[in-house]
Amino acid sequence: MAMHPVLDKDVNKKIFLLGNEAIVRGALEAGLDVAAAYPGTPSSEIGNTFDKMGDDAGVYFEYSTNEKVAMEVAAAGSACNLRAMTFMKHVGLNVAADAYMTIAYTGVRGGMLMVCADDPSCHSSQNEQDNRYYARLANIPMLEPSSCSEAKEMTRLGFDLSEEIELPILLRTTTRINHMRGIVNLGPLVPGKGKGYFDKDPGRFVTIPAHARTGHINLLKRMEKAMEISENSPFNKVIDLGGDEIGIVASGAAYNYVIDYMKSNGIKGKVLKLGMSHPVPEKMCADFMASVKMVAVAEEGEPLLENDLSKIAYQRELKVKIYGKNTDHFSRRNEYSPDTIKAGLGKLLNIPVNDNKLVPRKVELPTRPPSLCPGCPHRHTYHALKKALGQKFKEAIYSTDIGCYTLGIQSPLNSADFLLCMGSSVDAAGGFSKATDQPALAFLGDSTFFHSGIHGLINAVWNEHKFVYTILDNRTTAMTGHQPNPGMGRRGGGAPSKGSDIESIVRGCGVEFVRVVDPNDIKATTQVYKEALAYDGLAVVITKRACALLEVREWKKEGSFTPYQVDQEKCKKCKVCINTFACPAIELDNEGVVSINEEYCNGCSVCVQVCPFGAIGPVNDTGVKQ
């Protein structure tokens, strides 16, 4: 197997890396020992990279059952004087917040880095929360890279900073930084220690109230030191473009757009780039504001820096005017782009903004929303459930969760009514079962079950909730890129593992009605759902079928893959396959002719069961005419 480029030992070599890969390289150059995570876009490729490298990285890496577990695994490594990191998407820090807040009190021994990937514009998330607030909430230092090169260097030096002030460091990225590609200059790979030793110190690491009060005092002292470091950090710098008419303060991806806009338009002024943005370097910011006639703040998310600068200006009696979100020059919504900066600064500086529409669009292009893949077992599950519900389909409440199966919201499946966060489907379905007489149904995947679906199951048994709980076991963590989970028989890095059996866990929680079914068998799945809906109590249905992408990959390796097609002589154009099943591989043309696109077909054969006239069969079947 070829060596992963992130493991290249050629010092000073320049390579082209994804932002997430650059973070991994920075950690390896820092002598990382322990890494733990639960996959979540836009941070997923960090774990994927460790997973692909396996033992070659010389790092203990695990996919943990959820972000809180991962945070605590990394914290234990750090307490043993090893360098440790954990990484997650922004909402994952909500899950880990209990541990996260207290680690700030205990502090760390070995350097500890927490990578938190925010997702402005909700590309793959249920909210746009600005996790810079978390740095302020826990009162720990935060770094914000603007490029792949900075992502690598901030990761590498973040461990040094963590050990210097004995606090974890929050490395806050956004989607554009995680998924951008750029040139990274390689430094030497540093081997980790391998094993550490835990020197007992209950007064520090056992946070009973008396110890926690002392821990808080120590945290405040450490942050005073962090402020001194921030004032002189190489990641905080002023770029002087000549003139003092305007000074722009920027961080993260927004800095790239600001500097490009100013240079390309010949705008004179200064830019204060804040890479170590918490604690905010107050003296540096005050000196910067005193050196210009007005200040604009370019930051994605909430006006945190803008408010900090306003406070600093007020306390130091600076008369400079500050523009940003609070003055409606920039928006608190969505991620920034070059056009965002162009519009905001153009409005402020009275520079005309061109719309860049070189050619008028004559035809409005159709949208292409995400959909369940052809052959996806989740679609088959929903289809069978609809058949089982019959007339009660519209009345039933579909409490869904985070995963591919959330796409059941789309027509004609219409199987998603309520969603808050990972694991909420089960908890909410229990609430619905007590609040209304409507049929309540919960859906979550196998990885989400291990992440946060078990406690809701226990609660439902304990409180005698009555609903149908479907665990969609597609044998992987599909939505974030097919990472392993505890039910698959392998760990991060590819090592084999005994794993956990979902059915046994469910029965162990006290559930009496448990059925396991292959959702590709529509008749059997429909019958199981009829029994579950009639059951007077909590009913758990485990639909067990591998993700279609994994199946078709194996079939093609074996040479057993067969796509399906429509026999036009048998087809009655009833459109049942279109109107109730809606596999993306099944197409309807302007003449009302139904066909199957062989390039999209994943060969699951479920459409054969859906067609009421037997008009669908395998392509190699000579009895089927296209």
Image (cartoon, rainbow, N blue to C red):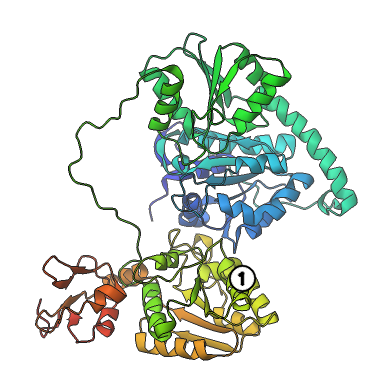
Q: Is residue 488 visible?
A: no
User: Quadrant where the N terminus lies?
Assistant: bottom left
The reply, left or right, for residue 227 in relation to residue 235 is: right
Which residue, as the protein is rendered here, is positioned at the far right? Answer: 210
Give the residue type at disc 1. Answer: Asp
Q: Position of residue 131 (x, y in %)?
A: 60, 44
Secondary element under disc 1, as helix, strand or loop, is helix
Which residue, as the protein is rendered here, is positioned at the far top? Answer: 243
User: Quadrant where the C terminus lies?
Assistant: bottom left
Q: Which residue is mark 1?
A: 427
Viewer-nearest residue: 401 or 164:
401
Instruction: Identify the residue at horizontal 39%, vertical 89% (top origin).
Output: 524
Against 176, residue 562 (above or below) is: below
Q: Is residue 331 visible?
A: yes
Instruction: Identify the residue at horizontal 60%, vertical 87% (top origin).
Output: 537
The reply, left or right, for residue 345 in relation to residue 109 is: left
